[in-house]
Amino acid sequence: MSIRVHVPIEQAEWSVQSPAEWVRQRSVDWAWRPGEGQGFGFLLIDEQHHVASQALYVRTVKMLTSLSAVQTQSQVVVEFDPAAQRLQLHELAIWRMSAEGAWQKREPVAKEAFLLRQREQQFEQQMLKGYVSLVALLEDVRVGDVIDLSWTLLPREPLPGLLFTALHFLAWSVPVATYCLALHASAGLNLRWRLHTPDGAAVPVEISEADGVSWRYDRPPMFQAEGNVAGGHWPFPVLEATCWQTWGQIARFFAELWADAATDAAESVAAEAQRLADGKTRAVAIVAALRFVQNDIRYLSVDFGHGAGMLPNGAGTVLRRRFGDCKDKSILLAALLRELGIAAWPVLVASGWRDGIQRLMPSTACFNHVIVGFELDGQRYFADPTVVGQGGDLERLAAPPFGAGLQIDPATDALLELPPPALAELTLTETFTLDRKCRDGAVDQVLEASGWLADDIRAALLNQGQRQFAKQRADALQQNFPALLPNPESMQIGDDSDGNRIELRSRHSMPTWGQTGRKPPDFFSYGAHGLFLAVETIDPHQQRAQPFQLRHPLRVCHSVVVRGKAVKKLKAGAFTHEGPGFRYRVDVRSRRREVRFDYRWESTAAEIAAEQWPEYCQQRAAALERAGALVHTPAFKPVAVALRLFPVLAVVGGLAAGWLGNPGNNRIVREAGGIEAAGSKAFEHVKRSEFSQAYSLAAAVQPNYRNNFDFQIMFSEAAIRTGHFAEAEQALAQARSLRAGEILPEQLQAALFEARGQLPQALELLKRLAGQAGAPERVYADLARVSERTGEFGNARAAWETVLSRHPAEPEALYSLARLLWLAGERERGDSLITGVIASQPVSSAALEGALARYFAVTGRPERAIEPARRASEREPGDPYLAYKHVRALIESGRHAEALAVAIGVSEKFPRQSMAAAALATAAAMANDNLRAEPAFKEWVELAPDNPDAVSSYGFFLHRTGRDREAQSLLEAATHKFPAHGNLWLNYSVVLDALGDTNAAEARQQAARLMTDEQRATLVR
């Protein structure tokens, strides 16, 4: 069976004609409008299926309410497969409201205005579909116009025996006034349907029709997708319709359809099977056939032509070409196994929905992947022929994680349940031999994995090559130990393929565990980085309404062994912590000249429910705070140092009962619902960084909480962030009187010094705090930041290294340390540090991608910042700050028009959000669109009164537009509220210069003293 014939674009069948008689015309609600901040919306989406012919009619009526929507939505595209479909275009017209308020339809677009274009959008993913696009470039489209488009897709060469089936996901990320769906079917077609609706969701109205059934869904809620959601969770209505009566009927259809492919070129397939089986038992021959198809037949999907998406190429054809998609590879593997005398069948599965298909009626539309099932000695096995690098004999073969499937066999009568994933384990043991003479120091790494984690490592070795894989592992270690001398060639691989276990051993010289060329430090500091080779990286600030899927079942261990004459014995100890979905344990053991830390992480659930997500993030953070290894390695006098496990820094906390006063007639307190409610709300505002609101509430009830330490801490932070420095000083004094010796008031005192611009005092205090036993992580982060601002870059690097030793892959520390390396001339090291850590994560988070974007921007490579900024925004589509950073990356690269288009979309998606206003204001100003920029700047200042960038940027905008006196007044007031903000002083000096004010020189000096390197590098004008 040959590869499908590609239909040339000039042979694509399309025409312009009226809709078929079976199509019902729907009314349009012309009075409806998209909500505030939405750039466009659909007045109507109408889909109608003609079940007998399997034709699909679609009409969309789309209103454009913003310039951004006109820019992005005025190119009409209808995509279809010319080998499998014929396109009938019915009408494309623009409606416009007249001066009298009546909607008028302009002349429909003529056929000559349409163009056929072809592109392979998934070519880089090794997928060729052969689709073509019918494109119309509309003329004279304006804000407020409505684009009315309708078309029908008809099968060109329907497969014999293929019955109608459809799945509709009733979820849209844009406003929709009305959605209509109709099934036109006669009684003899045995059509069935079912609507799945989540609890509490709106339900479409079902309407019986003379020739079938229809549904109407008015004002469906907008849906916000979230990443890493389990496939069986449907947070929106799902409508299924099918003419199939049983799963067995579908299995027989596929068995007949694929019969020729299974026997294609049987002689060559038999010869290959004989070669694979030569001298082997049947069990070993089965594994050999599987490995051959997985590793020697490359994945390439050529999915066009007759039967595209459903009909495989023949087994012999796939064998000859040595490439194919999941259908092709499965048909070849099944054919090889049958030649070996093994009963084998392709199995249809749903890679996304997994066992969720068990909730559906029989349907061909729910499957998107194929694996193979086979039997030996009464035992059933399953394998995915598209997996690369899989190990394990038949007893230890990791089953594909799809939950359920349909075996393509005439005897099949139901879905079969696939085995659950087996436990996978990963252990990283790193043994550090320390030598204070800097001669014989070394680190030995042993990475062991089993099950599907071993499969993942094999796949990485095959895809990257052994040397590159080894280099990445060594580079990741060198990020923590700069003096390490990587030796990628030392990697030795022990692969127990039958047992599905793999072991990688490496040894690298490490003269010192400190900075290159310096004496070894008095402490060895490291962290449980190895856990994140398998444990998910998350953004703890994300809010979720849908469950989060975990890698499960999973057990990970990172052992850190530190030995040498300089190593001092620690007190043995253990720490255990359990949270939703995980169990964590740290064991510390010690003997003469050796200390060992064992960090163990085990998953206990397959997913985290949405309501458990905040607790999961909190408990996970609490656990991972105990992921640091600190060993005393003094040069001379021995000192006994106990293991220190540092708690999470808690700036905010609950209210203590018993200190409530009289609410009186205070308006703020009354509106908040009383003193206790006002205090609680103040805490919540601080958690959300809404400091103005927090300060207003806390100041109103502060006398009632004078004896509450947590409240005084919260109030002092809110006061610092809003420029109320005297109140902050008083609150800190009160906090000290309540808990003498607490470190937290001193941390905030340092923050107060910094906010006032008293950087030397802040630095001195932070150094003292960092020297105390048990100093929390935030002290080191603050110390690093202030050290940078005062030019003590060596101290800053050491402090950031301390943070990373406790918190592997902490984004701010990772970004800052890489940037400092770059500034010191160690550019390759800086790049390797941040890109290596991100590459080592199982899943890169939005926070890490954002850190990478910041790094490229601040090191003068704004073009390279665009992609990670975009990825960060896409990974957390509900975060306006990440969207703002994407806009900034475009601005800093000089792409002002593109930045403005994106910013308009951001402001429409996030109305009344400060960072969305910031994106629009900045982008519009850089594009010289002052009419759009000014209201956006005003909104930014209004929504973010505690953000000095807002007033600073607005002041500079006023200067650019010739209003220097207004800018002077605004910026002068801001310098009193934010005296430590360098950009603010810079813009103030520019305005004073323009006015000829002699105070400009002093303002410039303040700017030079206070501006950070990042502010200088990312300054836009």
Image: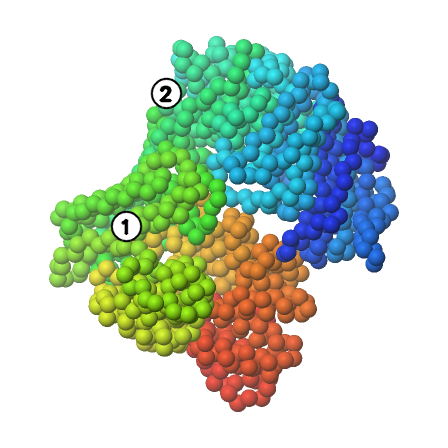
Query: Residue flagged by tag 2: what amino acid is it?
Result: Glu
Residue 407 sits above or below residue 459 on the image = above
Decide: is 963 above or below 643.
below
**Rendered image quadrant of residue 921:** bottom right
Residues at marks 2 and 1, CA–CA distance in whole angstroms: 38 Å
Left or right: 667, with 221 as reference point: left
Q: Is residue 469 left or right of residue 505?
A: right
Q: Residue at x 30, y 40 (%)?
A: 583
What element does badge 1 sit on?
Answer: loop
Amino acid on which the number 1 mark rests in the picture: Arg
Measuring from the top left, give residue 913's x and y in whole percent.
Answer: 55, 60
Left or right: 560 with respect to 149? left
- Where residue 626 is drawn, which disc sits there? 1
Give the residue at mark 2: 395
| Horizontal arrangement in the rendering, residue 151 relative to residue 533 (left or right) | right
Q: Position of residue 443 (x, y in %)?
A: 28, 47
The residue positioned 38% from the left and 42% from the top of the image is 535
Residue 767 position in % (x across, y down): 28, 69
